[in-house]
Amino acid sequence: MTRAYDPFDADRPLAMRCACGRPHSVNDHVQAFGSAYVAGAEPSSSLVNNGSMDAEAQRASDFMEAALVKALFPQEPVRRAFIKAVGRRTAMAAIASMFPMGAMQAMAQDKKPLEKTDLNIGFLPITCATPLVAADPLGFYAKEGLKVTLKRTAGWAVVRDKVLAGEFDAAHMLSPMPLAITMGLGADATPMVMPAIENINGNAITLHVKHKENRDPKNWKGMKFAIPFDYSMHNFLLRYYLAENGIDPDTDVQLRVMAPPDMVANLRAENIDGFIVAEPFNQRAVFDGVGFIHKLTSEIWDNHPCCAFAATRSFVETNPNTFAALFRAIVTSTLHCSEMDNRKAVAAAITGPNYLNQPLTVLEQVLLGRFADGLGKVRNDPNRIDFDPFPWQSMAVWMLTQMKRWGYVKQDINYAQLAEQVFLATDARKRMAELGFTAPKSNSKTHVIMGKTFDPSKPEAYVKSFAISKA
């Protein structure tokens, strides 16, 4: 028996047609004779172990392998000469080392029928949502057989409530939100999962232009700041930054929860002195001449998590194949957006009224990292925002320590267990590998925030190490 397609046979043309040599396709042969294989020939090996496959799966696997080799060697004499020169096994090993055929074929077999194809996904019009939003105009959802309707939403509480009510199948969320919802903070306790981070960095502390000479946070007592949500990296990073400068965020300043799209207008009206929020609103304040960028959040914690893709655990359990397809689309989009060469096209794709509805100039300054800071300088910082989907469980533990530090959580927390339940690092690693992407080998690591190392294995000691705390 021989395979329908054998790209490593140097003595037979790779015609991508029936292996019997007759002028018909493999499908025609199967319909006529019941098999795509020719009796009497020796079996051949491939890049993957296909022994457990049925005939139909074997043909699909062989075709993928043959198509790859055909793409690498479009000139038939070159393919045959290469295999004759190095030998069949060496050729197979060389190509397998560069292209994860096993993973590609496993992923193809894993694409089972979707339980649900029409999905409503909520998002806020901020650059943190770039991968989730860009997956629509760039075709990543459609490629997975999904028809996604993106629902632009004004505030995070609305996102949370619509997810819990089932109006949104999944959503763009602040990365601490799935943890908070799972614990019943601000809403009825509902198990959530967070399989992928959408962005890292991508935020700033912006002050009103009247504070250009008031850059030392030690002098900020009595000032008013807007934050987008209690359970946000923005809240935790601003609190951390203030406390490290001797300012108690609960007694020395006022923190007001405010929808991100409302922050620039409130800064212009001087209802607030500043805000910490995702882009493009920091850059929009500079663009409108009402604010300046005091500090990028990457200068507080470089490569910190911000927003994420999340869903209820019940949605995942009810729609596992749909969830897997959604994950593939969003992770592929996230890694596409992480490439700087793609950023200009991404900015153009998401600028319109159905997406972020912002001037293209503003989005390009954020995504490309070359921007005016409102202080008369043009800065170049390619890491101003980046996109990395891996959901480090150590990041979840850090968020939980800040909830405990500032009194959002009174009870004891099983930090590692909760992080593992919500931040699906192990699942993300598996699915990223299926897509041919490299994921970290560990679920946790240490992080450095304002020069202080956070060890996720010692969360309680970390909570107790701060001079300003409510714990």
Image (cartoon, rainbow, N blue to C red):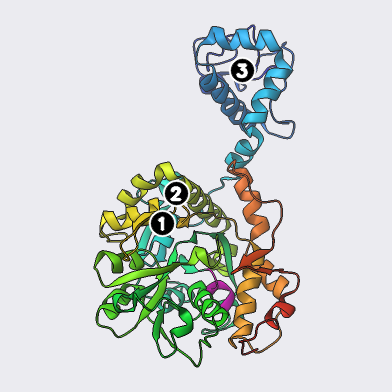
Q: Residue furthest front?
A: 213
Q: Which residue is mark 3?
A: 7
Q: Secondary structure at mark 1?
A: helix
In the image, what residue type sits under mark 1?
Thr
- The magenta stretch is 175-180
Q: Quadrant of the C terminus?
A: bottom right
Count how many numbered circles sit on residues in the image. 3
Q: Which residue is mark 1?
A: 130
Q: Quadrant of residue 291?
A: bottom left
Q: Residue furthest bottom?
A: 251
Name the residue: 48% across, 67% down: 297
In the image, what residue type sits under mark 2?
Cys
**Residue 337's mark?**
2
Query: Could you tell me if residue 52 is visible in this image?
Result: yes
* Residue 207 placement, left or right of 9: left
Do tag 3 and tag 1 residues touch (Cβ < 8 Å)?
A: no
Which tag, 1 or 2, sits closer to the chain's start? Answer: 1
Question: Which sits in the foreground, 403 or 134?
Answer: 403
Name the residue: 32% across, 66% down: 375
Question: Which sits in the foreground, 269 or 47?
Answer: 269
Q: Main secondary structure of the magenta part?
A: helix
The answer to whether residue 177 is magenta is: yes
Q: Position of residue 161 (x, y in %)?
A: 44, 78
Question: Which sits in the foreground, 16 or 102?
Answer: 102
